[in-house]
Image (spheres, helix red, strand yellow):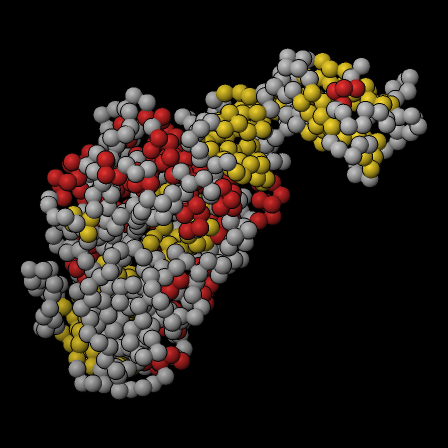
């Protein structure tokens, strides 16, 4: 779940007198609900099948606000009685240009009470969302909006997701941004700190992410837009089809939030960055005064067998997505954002609470009718028990075109979310198998294809990466990490003072940042994610070693905890450059972005899995990569590990080590083994332009007493150059020979003489050729039937 339990104030659901079979209502897919604006007339349409009477109430203004920012008196409007049509749809057409007016629906249900309701389909609202607004769509579009074209199609595994909160992005005083906390902060380009480091949107482009995943930007309940000082993640939906007003420069003007939200999206697209919208269709903040209950009482919310609200969300209610008109609402909303706001994808909060039929239809229809490369993914779990039978959990995504968060992999890499338990990158020695599975895209776990797994270590929920590493290392107390409760220090006191006293970076030497153990563990965790098959996601600020000072649930903790400190870019510049290099490696080389299981099974081999080390080999130009062979080694132990590299006649170029990452060669290797420092990753690629130097040559002469050599051949391993079958060459004077090449550091190779590959073998046991270090040429003669039980080196002539 994405925030602490919310204190609900809704009354018990009223039981309607009309007991029509509402679960059986057919979706009205061909009728547009909401307001259809025109300069000469506007058309209003509302689905309210249980209502006895509905009035469209028009207002000249947004109403009178009380001290809390609420509008409670909705009298004084122009009431227009609507006409009921088929399937309970109420309509009204009003002549003239209504732009600038506000509206509500006044609805009488069977129990005789009139209640005012905001249009669930409203696309513009007043400040704090108490009245719908009528706007001219043309006025809401930024300059050149029509030129904002969709970015080129990419495969899901080409994506690198960056999860970001709009306010966190710019609120720190060192951000250099004029529009701090606003959508427009994303439009500010050319910003840099005093050292010349790019800031803001230029930083995102420099880092190389493909998608910014924005925490909810629809209109949410818990922030008073008129004040602009409150903070929330936004998982408390109010008006689903309207941008949040607190992120606009003027929430009192309905068209401003729309235009500025589009300007943000437009600016990101201009930088080549796609936009993912975090959507919350599993619950609403409240029920009785929420977006649906006043319109169609009892319909939109899932209930237990007793008739009470089910609570699979953990915050008091859950939407009944399996009902036709709820499903229609969700699909209509997503399509509106995709078409009107040019959204490139959606992330579903608590996706398990949405039935599989709804999710399948969303994916199929959006891909077919809006954007073939739209990216859809979500959390395959609930926040509590739910009566929904067909939940969208891990496994239901197989072959369906969407992805789910991979909590198995997350746990294997880091351990638990908020405590001190450890994973591979934080010191647990028994996670190699789970890490190997995740590296392969979890195709032998819950996924059919790698495109179905979102690989990540931390997101906005729970301890962020830096704080989790400190906690796992037992350094949280020394760092002064805070214990927070619902946005305030658990032991009282001033949050500003406590954050000021916190020392999250006490263990880092500014002179040699990359040798610090917490830095190494932090980098290792996300390095694993970024070289895994699947879709990687990183949390905003990880590349700057962002700390939230130990707050594991900062949903309302304010800017002092949540704001990204841009000063850390210069302070931890090698860390940023490392992330940038890893993203360049992934972007440049398609072998890290295989999309389906067949590719992975054919081109990826785990070559080490144990001893706190996992390594894999990508071969034969995987996924059309220009590099023929790539080896990735991750060492989760504190000590150096030695790994035997796959045999290759070509030298290896190291492009990632414990200090730098990218696509450029950092060092070359001609040996058969490589030493990998503790708590680090190494990536090597075979260089076909550079054959290995200083090879050892072994001339093996083979004689048989029966002089029958047809079909006999030699198999070797451990050469570091070319393992496998070597054919014999006939000698003029009888017998046959084979030439074996070995890397310069090899002093023993294994071999077997076999007939027709595996039909027969010359000896009962494997044999080994042992030769002294520094030897460059070794001649060996083997006579069939002699030397039983001894090594071949004993037979050298």
Q: Is residue 500 above or below residue 32?
A: above
Task: Please provide percent x and percent y for residue 186.
Answer: 27, 42
Quadrant housing residue 16:
bottom left
Q: Residue at x 43, y 62 (%)?
A: 392
Q: Is residue 384 or residue 357 the one in the foreground?
A: 384
**Image quarter of residue 515:** top left
502 over 40 or under it: above or below: above
Q: Residue at x 25, y 32 (%)?
A: 505
Q: State left or right for residue 391 relative to residue 776.
A: left
Work out whether residue 96 can be spotted: no
Residue 661 as seen in the image, left or right of residue 3: right
Image quarter of the C terminus: top right
- Of 697 and 420, nearer the camera is 420
Where is residue 443? Give x, y as percent: 54, 50
Residue 398 vs 426, above or below: the answer is: below
Where is the N terminus found, in terms of image quarters?
bottom left
What is the x, y in percent for residue 708? Answer: 91, 29
Residue 484 shows in the view: yes
x and y percentages locating residue 639 in the rendered image? 44, 28
Q: Residue at x 77, y 28 (%)?
A: 789
The residue at the point 34 percent across, 64 percent down is 384
Query: As rendered, which of 606 and 245 lies closer to the eye?
Result: 606
Query: In the image as oriented, which residue stretches furthest toward the front?
Result: 789
């Amino acid at each position: 779940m994405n925030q602490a339990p919310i204190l609900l104030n809704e009354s018990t659901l009223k039981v309607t007198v009309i007991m029509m079979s509402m679960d059986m209502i057919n979706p009205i897919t061909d009728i547009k609900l909401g307001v259809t604006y025109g300069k000469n007339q506007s058309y209003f349409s509302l689905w309210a099948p249980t209502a006895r009477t509905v009035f469209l109430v028009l207002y000249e203004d947004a109403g009178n606000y009380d001290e809390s920012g609420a509008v409670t008196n909705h009298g004084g409007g122009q009431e227009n009685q609507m006409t009921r049509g088929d399937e309970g749809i109420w309509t009204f057409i009003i002549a003239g240009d209504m732009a600038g007016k506000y509206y509500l629906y006044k609805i009488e249900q069977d129990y005789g009470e009139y209640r005012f309701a905001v249009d669930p389909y409203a696309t513009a609202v007043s400040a704090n969302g108490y009245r719908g607004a009528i706007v001219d769509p043309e006025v809401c579009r930024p300059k050149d909006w029509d030129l904002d074209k969709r970015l080129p199609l990419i495969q899901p595994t080409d994506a690198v997701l960056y999860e970001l909160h709009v306010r966190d992005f710019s609120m720190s005083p060192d951000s250099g941004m004029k529009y701090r906390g606003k959508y427009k902060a994303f439009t500010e380009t050319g910003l840099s700190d005093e050292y010349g480091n790019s800031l803001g949107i230029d930083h995102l482009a420099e880092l190389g992410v493909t998608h910014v995943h924005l925490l909810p930007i629809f209109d949410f309940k818990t922030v008073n837009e008129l004040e602009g000082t409150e903070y929330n993640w936004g998982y408390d939906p109010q008006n689903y089809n309207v941008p949040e007003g607190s992120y606009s420069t003027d929430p009192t003007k309905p068209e401003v939030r729309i235009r500025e939200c589009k300007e943000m999206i437009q600016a990101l697209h201009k930088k080549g960055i796609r936009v993912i919208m975090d959507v919350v269709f599993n619950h609403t903040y409240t029920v009785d005064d929420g977006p649906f209950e006043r319109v169609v009482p009892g319909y939109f919310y899932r209930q237990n067998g007793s008739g009470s609200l089910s609570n699979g969300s953990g915050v008091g209610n859950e939407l009944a997505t399996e009902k036709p008109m709820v499903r229609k609402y969700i699909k209509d909303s997503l399509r509106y954002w995709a078409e009107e706001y040019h959204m490139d994808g959606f992330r579903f909060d608590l996706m398990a609470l949405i039935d599989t039929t709804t999710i399948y239809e969303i994916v199929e229809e959006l891909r077919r009718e809006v954007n073939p490369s739209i990216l859809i993914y979500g959390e395959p779990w609930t926040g509590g028990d739910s009566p929904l039978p067909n939940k969208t959990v891990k496994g239901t995504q197989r072959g369906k075109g969407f992805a789910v968060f991979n909590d198995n992999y997350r746990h294997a890499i880091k351990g638990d979310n908020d405590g001190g338990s450890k994973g591979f990158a934080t010191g647990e020695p028994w996670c190699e198998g789970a890490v190997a599975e995740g590296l392969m895209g979890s195709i032998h776990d819950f996924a059919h294809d790698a495109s179905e797994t979102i690989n990540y270590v931390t997101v906005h929920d729970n301890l962020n990466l830096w704080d989790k590493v400190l906690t796992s290392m037992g350094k949280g107390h020394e760092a002064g990490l805070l214990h927070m409760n619902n946005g305030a220090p658990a032991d009282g006191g001033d949050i500003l003072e406590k954050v000021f006293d916190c020392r999250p970076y006490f263990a880092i030497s500014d002179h040699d940042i990359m040798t610090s153990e917490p830095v190494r563990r932090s980098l290792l965790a996300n390095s694993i994610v970024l070289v895994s098959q699947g879709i990687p996601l990183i949390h905003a600020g990880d590349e700057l070693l962002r700390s939230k000072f130990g707050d594991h649930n900062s949903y309302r903790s304010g800017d002092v905890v949540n704001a990204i400190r841009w000063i850390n870019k210069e302070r931890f510049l090698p860390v940023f450059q490392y992330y940038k290099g890893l993203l360049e490696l992934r972007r440049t080389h398609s072998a890290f972005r295989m999309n389906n299981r067949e590719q992975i099974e054919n081109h990826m081999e785990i070559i080490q899995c144990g001893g706190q080390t996992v390594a894999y080999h990508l071969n034969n130009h995987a996924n059309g990569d220009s590099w023929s062979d790539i080896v990735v080694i991750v060492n989760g132990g504190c000590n150096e590990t030695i790994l035997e590299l796959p045999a290759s006649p070509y030298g290896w170029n190291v492009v990632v080590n414990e200090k730098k990452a990218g696509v450029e060669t950092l060092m070359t290797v001609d040996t058969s083994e490589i030493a990998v420092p503790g708590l680090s990753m190494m990536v090597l690629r075979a260089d076909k332009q550079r054959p290995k130097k200083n090879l050892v040559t072994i001339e093996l002469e083979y004689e048989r007493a029966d002089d029958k050599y047809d079909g006999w051949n030699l198999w070797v391993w451990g050469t570091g150059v070319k393992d496998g079958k070597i054919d014999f060459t006939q000698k003029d004077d009888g017998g046959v020979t084979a030439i074996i090449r070995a890397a310069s550091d090899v002093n023993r190779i294994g071999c077997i003489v076999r007939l027709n590959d595996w039909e027969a073998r010359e000896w009962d046991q494997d044999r080994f050729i042992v030769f002294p270090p520094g030897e460059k040429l070794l001649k060996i003669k083997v006579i069939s039937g002699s030397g039983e039980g001894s090594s071949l080196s004993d037979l050298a002539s």
